[in-house]
Amino acid sequence: MEQLHEKYAADSDGGLRILAFPSNQFGKQEPGSEAQIKDFVKKYNVSFDMFGKIDVNGATEHPLYTYLKSVQAGFVTNNIKWNFTKFVINKEGKPVARFGPTDDPIPAVEDKVKELMAEP
């Protein structure tokens, strides 16, 4: 994701914005505090926006994820199955694609980003 951020964030038409929302709903994958998580990703030179931990499934899921999942359904169920699920949202704020945690951002997400950036 960092490669995509570096490549497309400076686009003259507003560019790509990557927003990361850690979640601890997947086997304690993100057990640290917000500060610890941000410190951890420094070793990967992450420069896109990292937000605080949220729930992405269930009764306490963040409203953003309720919306994203309602517009871009998942495979079999709408639940987020693991961290690194990726949503692509167009300039109008509408989710236009959803990629699973095992989908490689390059080329899958990049192809969708290129398509959106080419639209008039």
Image (cartoon, rainbow, N blue to C red):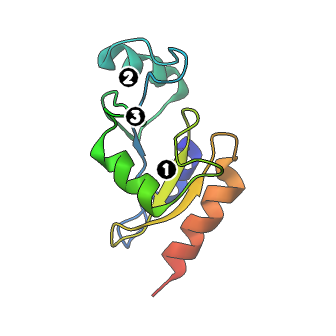
- Label 3 neighbourhood size at 10 Å, few (<14), some (14-19), many (20+)? few
What's the residue at 53%, 23% (across, down)?
Answer: 26
Report the Cα–Cα distance between label 3 and label 1: 30 Å
Q: Quadrant of residue 15?
A: bottom left
Residue 7 image point, x, y percent: 54, 55
Q: Amino acid at mark 2?
A: Lys
Foreground tag (3 vs 1): 3
Residue at numbered disc 1: 5
Helix, strand, or loop for circle 3?
loop
Q: In the displayed structure, would residue 8 be above or below residue 105?
A: below
Residue 38, disc: 2
Q: Earlier in the sequence, mark 2 or mark 1?
A: 1
The quadrant of the image that shows the C terminus is bottom left
Q: Is residue 11 left or right of residue 85?
A: left
Neighbourhood count class around disc 1 (C-alpha, 10 Å): few under 14, some 14–19, many 20 upward? some
Q: Which residue is mark 3?
A: 58
Mark found first going from the N terminus, 3 or 1:
1
Q: What's the residue at 37%, 73% (across, down)?
A: 13
Relative to 80, residue 75 above or below: below
Q: Judge by depth and name the residue closer to the eye, 30 or 49.
A: 30
Amino acid type assigned to the residue bearing label 3 in the image: Gly
Q: Position of residue 39 (x, y in %)?
A: 39, 17
Gap between marks 2 and 1, in whole Å?
17 Å
User: Where 115 falls versus 5 (above or below)?
Assistant: below
Say left or right for 82 vs 25: right
Point 50% across, 14% down: residue? 28
Marks 3 and 2, how far apart at CA = 25 Å
Element type at mark 2: helix
**Disc 2 versus disc 1: nearer the observer:** 2
The answer to whether residue 86 is visible is yes
Point out residue 58 in the picture as x, y percentages from the top left corner: 40, 34
